[in-house]
Amino acid sequence: MLGGWEVEDEAIGPPAALLERLSAIKARPRGYAYSKDFSAAKEQAAALFHDEVRFGGAAIAPEQVAVLSNSSQALLLALTALRERGVRRAVIAAPTYFATIHICQHLGLDVLILPAADFFTGAFDTARLATAVQPDGSVLILTNPAYSLGVEYTQTQLQALFAALPADAWVLLDETRLGLHWRDDAPWYRGDFPPQTLALRSPSKVFLLNGLKTSLLLGPASLLRMAEKLGESLVGSVAGNAEEVALVYLDAWRAWRQECQEGRIGPLRAWKRQLVERFQQHRDAAGALLCQAGFRLSPVDSGPYVLAGIERQRVPVLDSAEIARERGVLLMTSGYFYHQSEDWLGFRLNLCGDPASAQEAITRVFAPSAEAFYATIAQ
């Protein structure tokens, strides 16, 4: 597998202290809870984001936080609540998470997917997005960092987009993987969002933990209460230790931000820098082979993924099923995350993968000696 989710490199993992604290939490198999009651986690999250996350110029309050089990659940409940508010159309900036599209379709929303203005950077087309978002009944869905490209949108880019939208437009900002910027140690940027914005952030994703998860949905209090109420009927209760898990993640986030504010390299900033260094090593090793085969890499500056792209005139199609059958390698092609271009196609490279396995897979699929369909890459 070249482009999946798995962490295969033994040198890549969560912070040791965080893993130890999470492992010490009792399972409580007979206990249950509802996220609306997680007042301690909401208060801690609001205090954590107080100086750096604003909605319409106002600092975030505890009632503007919902604590949910994972990002897919958060997307489902947020979009369901928006539909209850009258939203009937989703304008989605590609590239995007596949589940977002499926959720919108299952909710009966009209879906318009707009391609990125640039295949390698994922730069969004502000004019087209602003025109497509209707003043009443639309939500704009944007993923930051650009899904599977490893490119993070800046606050300047986001503010320019927000300013171009209708004043009453809803925005759903999926920032599940925000926090692993390659040059900036801060876990997030300072942002002032329009009042009708929902921002989704997931520390469990950033810390590379897939078992005990937590996601935070930030936004208008009334919409979050609706999402929590819908959660009770649509997904039911959550594990009895869910708030304790969230508090451990929030404490780790707080320690990380404090290291940045104090200008010192503590255990979390050191962990993050070592992680990025490993990502860079993987990118360089894989890139050397892929560039020989005619591929270009996206200018990755955030997270564990990079996009490898090639001109369609050199390779008309990348058939992941055919490649899996004939080469034994599974590619997550750009079509999987709705990243389309008339001139380019490509696949996602997972920088958490074992470097030796990745190089073997790349050589097997894209080596100049590959016959027939693959031979055109070397020309």
Image: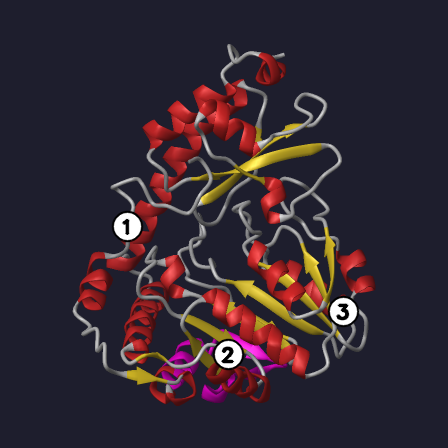
Provide the residue designation for mark 3: 165
Horizontal and vertical percent position of residue 360: 38, 23
Closest to the observer, 237 or 1: 237
Residue nearest the viewer, comparing 190 with 43: 43
Please give the residue where the numbered disc 1 appears in the rendered image. 13
Q: Which residue appears at 46% of the width and 77% of the height? A: 235
Is 315 drawn above or below residue 276 in the view shown?
above
Amino acid at circle 2: Leu
Give the SS element for disc 3. loop
Mark 2 → mark 1, Cα distance in angstroms: 33 Å
Relative vertical location of residue 261 with respect to residue 335 in this rendering, above or below: below
User: Which three-letter amino acid code belongs to the residue tagged 3?
Assistant: Leu
* Left or right relative to 10: residue 220: right
Give the residue type at disc 1: Gly
Crowdedness of circle 3 by 10 Å Cα count: few (<14), some, many (20+)?
Answer: many
**Mark 2 vs 1, N-terminal side:** 1
Instruction: Give the residue at x 70% y 48%.
Output: 116
In this rendering, position of residue 247 left or right of residue 340: left
Give the magenta-colored segment's residue range: 42-64
Q: Residue at x 50, y 75 (%)?
A: 217
> In the figure, is residue 309 to the left or right of 90?
left
Disc 3/disc 2 C-alpha distance (Å): 31 Å
Place of residue 224 in the rendered image (x, y in percent of width and height, measured from the top left): 54, 83
Q: How many numbered circles does the render carry?
A: 3
Residue 234, disc: 2
In which quadrant will I find the C terminus?
top right
Task: Assign a secondary structure to mark 2.
Answer: helix
